[in-house]
Amino acid sequence: MNIADRFTQIAGINQQKVAVKYPHRAGNKYNYDTITFGELESLSNKYANGLSKIGFNRGSKTLLFVRPSLKFPALASGAFYEVSEGRIYC
């Protein structure tokens, strides 16, 4: 079992629970954007498929430059999905 397998397992159990909160300033207060485990898994799969289409596969080395946002955990977890025969297995 790898990190992507574990994430999929947790997301399956906690689909509607908040996985990540991201603060953003609104005047002199902070509000929080959130993403659920189900949404995060779905977005991670989209990123994993996109990475696969551009040639990212097992053993690829990469560096992520992403502004702090809810997209970062999805992109980072998408990079852990196993690519096999052009399909993403998670």
Image: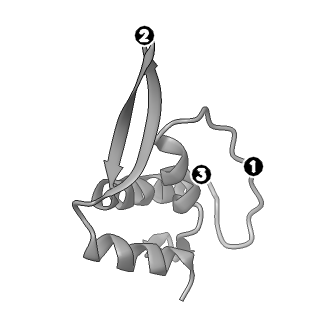
Q: Is 16 left or right of 51, judged from the image as shown?
A: left
Q: Is residue 29 above or below residue 50?
A: above
Query: Which residue is disc 2 drawn over?
Result: 27
Q: Amino acid at mark 2?
A: Gly
Give the residue drawn at x 55%, y 45%. 72
Measure the alpha-carbon separation of dots 2 and 1.
Answer: 33 Å
Mark positioned earlier in the residue sequence (3 or 2): 2
The label number, if any, that marks residue 85 in the structure image: none
Give the residue drawn at x 53%, y 70%. 81
Measure the alpha-carbon separation of dots 3 and 2.
Answer: 40 Å
The label number, if any, that marks residue 54 in the structure image: 3
Give the residue drawn at x 52%, y 52%. 73
Q: Amino acid at mark 3?
A: Ile
Q: Secondary structure at mark 2?
A: loop
Q: Secondary structure at mark 1?
A: loop
Mark positioned earlier in the residue sequence (1 or 3): 3
